[in-house]
Amino acid sequence: MKSRHSLYVLLVLLLFSCKSYEEMYYDVLRPAAYSVPPAIKSVVIVDNAFPFNPDNAHIAHVLGDEVRLDTVRVDTFVSVIISQLKKELDYRRFFDTVYIDTLQYNTVSDRKPYRSLTWQQVAAICERHNADAVLSLDGAEYGTSVSVQDMEVEYYATMDVRGLVYWRLFDKFSRDILYAYPQRDTLYWDGVGQDVTTSVVSFPSLKEATIELGNYLGATFADQLVPFWEPVKRRVYLTGNSHFVNAAEWLSKDNRYEAEKLWGFIYEHGNSREKGKAANNIAISLEARGEMKLAVEWAYKSYEAFEMKGVTGTADERQVAKKLYVDMVRRYRDIKKLEEQIGGLQ
């Protein structure tokens, strides 16, 4: 599996910054929503969607009047989703091979929207591609709403394009439907102008917006089956007393252990606000070393210290401490699921 960045990277802190803290940005690995069985090494993506041709897919409300823009058809919507999904799965290298079956299995003559593939079809598809599983797109719908309002001093316009895609994952070994998922999402634009035309001039065309939605749906569905990297922001406190400055100096030399000793001393002897800052820093350092259980404990100590009566932190510091604790708990719970999906973590 290809990572976009190193999982644990601590940025060099600016020791002489006037800020009381430095923010770090890096990516962490999140587990997929569903754990694909290890036996499945290759998958075939299939178009099993009933053709979608409504007369009310695109509707505009302009100054109180409703207009149906039903002449716009996006027949490539499904193929865009499937193509983008394959591209994303190939990039992540979770499966050995990802195929796209070129046949369309649910035609107008069948007239059965959201119909499931039969087991005979699943077996034939797997045999033809020498694959272990079939990922079937069993339905796809889209719709666009455009609204323009007169706000007296200017016109305000919005545009949202929404989609619904229904997926099923079939396993040729167990003959089970392993996973079924109705995927819903919306892309949104807004604009202002001196008249109706200028308020919507920055919007994509209806077809362009629908295709962009298809690409987005295909790319994001991969998160349901494959672990993904997500950016996070962490705060490291640099000031509070002289020990924070000394700890920051150790950290800039990539010596987290010495920094942790100083933060530990601050936690034992400081006031509640200093305890909260020190515990926060220890939690982040432990996270960087992969000690997630201890990181959770220290993140809670930070949250607890900022909430203590007496000398407490600012509202912003309390909120940051709470968010850190919640995310550390999430990451700790993710470990077992990630081990199921990609093996032992280092």
Image: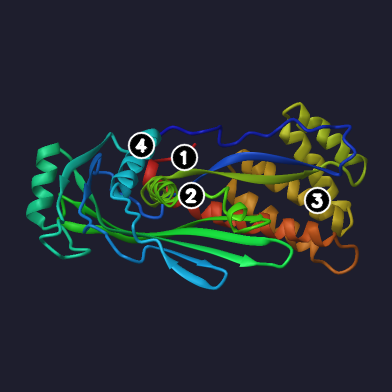
Judged left or right of residue 173, residue 265 is right
Q: Position of residue 124 (x, y in %)?
A: 8, 46
Give 341 or 68, whichever is nearer the viewer: 68
* Contact between labelled residues 1 and 2, with CB atoms less than 8 Å apart: yes
Q: Which residue is mark 2?
A: 335
Mark 1 is on which residue type? Leu
Distance Cα–Cα, label 4 vs label 3: 43 Å
First along the sequence among labels 1 and 4: 4
Distance Cα–Cα, label 1 vs label 3: 29 Å
Q: Which residue is mark 1?
A: 345
Residue extending farthest bottom = 64
First along the sequence among labels 2 and 4: 4
Q: Which residue is mark 3?
A: 277
Q: Residue 223, which numbered label?
A: none
* Contact between labelled residues 4 and 1, with CB atoms less than 8 Å apart: no
Residue 85, placed above or below residue 307: above
Mark 2 residue element = helix
Distance Cα–Cα, label 2 vs label 1: 8 Å
Q: Position of residue 210 (x, y in %)?
A: 41, 51
Mark 4 is on which residue type? Lys
Q: Which residue is mark 4?
A: 87
First along the sequence among labels 2 and 1: 2
Distance Cα–Cα, label 1 vs label 4: 26 Å
Mark 4 residue element = helix
